[in-house]
Image: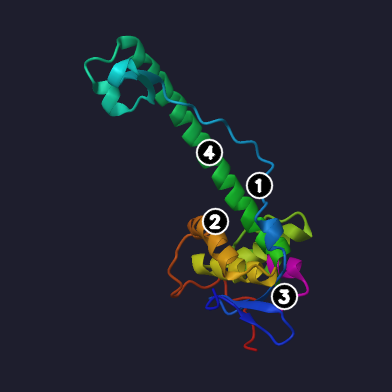
Amino acid sequence: MSDFYTVEPDGTVIATVQSGWVVECQPVGDLLLLVGDHIERPVEPSPPTYTMGGVGGATEERDHNQESIDDPKTSEAEREAWMVYLAQKAAYDARMAEIEARINEMRGTFINLEGMKVRGLPDDLRAWAEQQRTRYGFEIEAETPDDLLLAFIDHNVIRTAKDGVRVTAGILRATGLDQEALDAAEATFLDSLEGRQGGGDDSGDQGVSGEGEPENE
């Protein structure tokens, strides 16, 4: 993880992203790990079962799978139950994919608004947004200061998949997680964060515009 961030003498954890911006990682990793916990998950459907005979008359209840369903001994009623299960499982998987996508989006918003502070952030983001419209034709949809900040970060700061991983790792380090906990967190959602950010290659992936580029510190 140390490749993703550095710790300054005063203990501030910073991450330098591909676009050159430096962000201070905030100690909110415990809250980041809880993002989306309130979202209700559906109950995963259970496959139909069948009874298998054993030695001495003993029986064992087993879950059906495609192989057992294809067995000529399987009844038509069991096959119908299997088809119902497949439809329920498909609906469950689709719903879980929607939930995961929503949680990934919420995590990204939390990281950008609560988990980091951008050094050298322009004082007037509305002027920046107007410049984006007039100079490049970008429509910046921002009704609140938070919307403006998110738009600026999306356009100029967090531009690659690895940027998201760098900042997330820095947040967890700033929170005081030990290496074992960092590894566990990486296994649970850093990979999905990479997928949300897209474009895992850092090379040549700069901000949408050249405006507001950071000065080298």
Residue in view at x 48 percent, y 35 percent: 94
Q: Which element carries disc 2, helix, strand or loop?
A: helix
Query: How far separated are the C-alphas under marks 1 and 4?
Result: 12 Å
Q: In this view, does 217 lie to the left or right of 204?
A: right
**Marks 3 and 4 close (CB-CB < 8 Å):** no
Q: Is residue 185 left or right of residue 195?
A: right
Q: Pick whichever of labels 1 and 3 is earlier in the sequence.
A: 1
Query: How far separated are the C-alphas under marks 1 and 3?
Result: 28 Å
- Mark 2: which amino acid? Phe
Residue 199 location, x and y as percent? 45, 63
| Crowd band around label 2 with a 10 angstrom C-alpha radius: few (<14), some (14–19), many (20+) | some
First to last magenta residue range: 119-129
- Mark 4: which amino acid? Met
| Crowd band around label 4 with a 10 angstrom C-alpha radius: few (<14), some (14–19), many (20+) | some
Q: Which element carries disc 4, helix, strand or loop?
A: helix
The numbered mark at residue 96 is 4
What residue would you read off at disc 2? 189
The numbered mark at residue 162 is none
Q: Pick whichever of labels 4 and 2 is earlier in the sequence.
A: 4
Q: In which quarter of the image is the C terminus?
A: bottom right
Residue in view at x 45 percent, y 29 percent: 89
Q: Pick whichever of labels 1 and 2 is earlier in the sequence.
A: 1
Which of label 3 and label 4 is nearer to you? 4
What residue would you read off at disc 1? 36
Residue 109 location, x and y as percent? 66, 57
